[in-house]
Amino acid sequence: MKTNIRELRKERKLSQEELAEAVGTTRQTITSIEVGKYIASLPLAYKIAKYFGKTIEEVFDFSDMEEQ
Amino acid sequence: MEKYRGKLKKQIWINAAAAAILVAVQILAFSQVIDPLAADNHWADMWNGFIAGASMGVMALFIVGIILGIRALMNEKALKKLYIKENDEREKNIAIEARSAGAQIFLIGGLVAGIVAGYFSVTVSITVIACILALSVISGILMLIYRKKY
């Protein structure tokens, strides 16, 4: 699944470690979500979106699912 | 975080109790109150050495757990880090998938091993098949429980 996390992070000059700490997960999980290897759970997706002040759809790209 | 703090304290006590039990067993073994079951003295010595080494290794794990736990309890940042590490959803998913795949491989491999062992040793064959049966029954019961839960 594609996400805008990396772009949003860079806009705010935020490291993966800092984002991970803010949303209560590990840096490795953030890396995996960013590269699309891991799909975040709904609670984690909500936390990440809320942290950036966006909706889940604005952070996570669900177009692949819509095609299915 | 307070709930986790309480859980960590409990874990430290369990680790300490387990380490104490291992020390007691080692003292009993060294004073020869208890001896490992083996056919002859050669194997008894070897087995005793293996058990002693394994006990030391497991005890080291318990002690590391106690040290990490105490360190986390004394430092809020370390406590949060440990909490995140233990509760990270990706790590939990990896563990669940790895255990599930491992159990499946063990079931299939064990079944084949149990049948093949039947041509060489009845005891080994029955032991392996009993292990497979126990794992299957436990998995089945857990499946029923989790179906009710979710």
Image (tube, coloured by chain):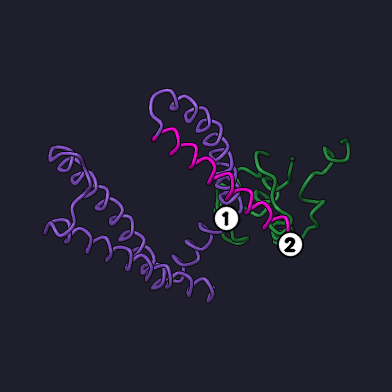
Chain colours: A green, B purple
Amino acid on which the number 2 mark rests in the picture: Lys
Of B93 and B16, the residue lying toward us: B16
Q: Which residues are magenta?
A: B123-150
- Please state if B64 lies on the left or on the right of A18 as rendered: left
10 Å crowding of disc 1: few (<14), some (14-19), many (20+):
some
Q: Position of residue B54 (x, y in %)?
A: 27, 48
* Image label count: 2
Residue occupied by mark 2:
A50
Question: Which of the pair B128/A47 is nearer the observer?
Answer: B128
Q: Is label 2 on the same chain as label 1?
A: no
Point out residue A29 in the picture as x, y percentages from the top left corner: 59, 48
Q: Is residue B145 left or right of residue B127?
A: right
**SS at circle 2:** helix
Disc 1 is attached to a residue of which chain?
Answer: B
Which residue corresponds to the image point at 36% horizontal and 61% vertical from the top-left? B65
Tag 1 residue: B88
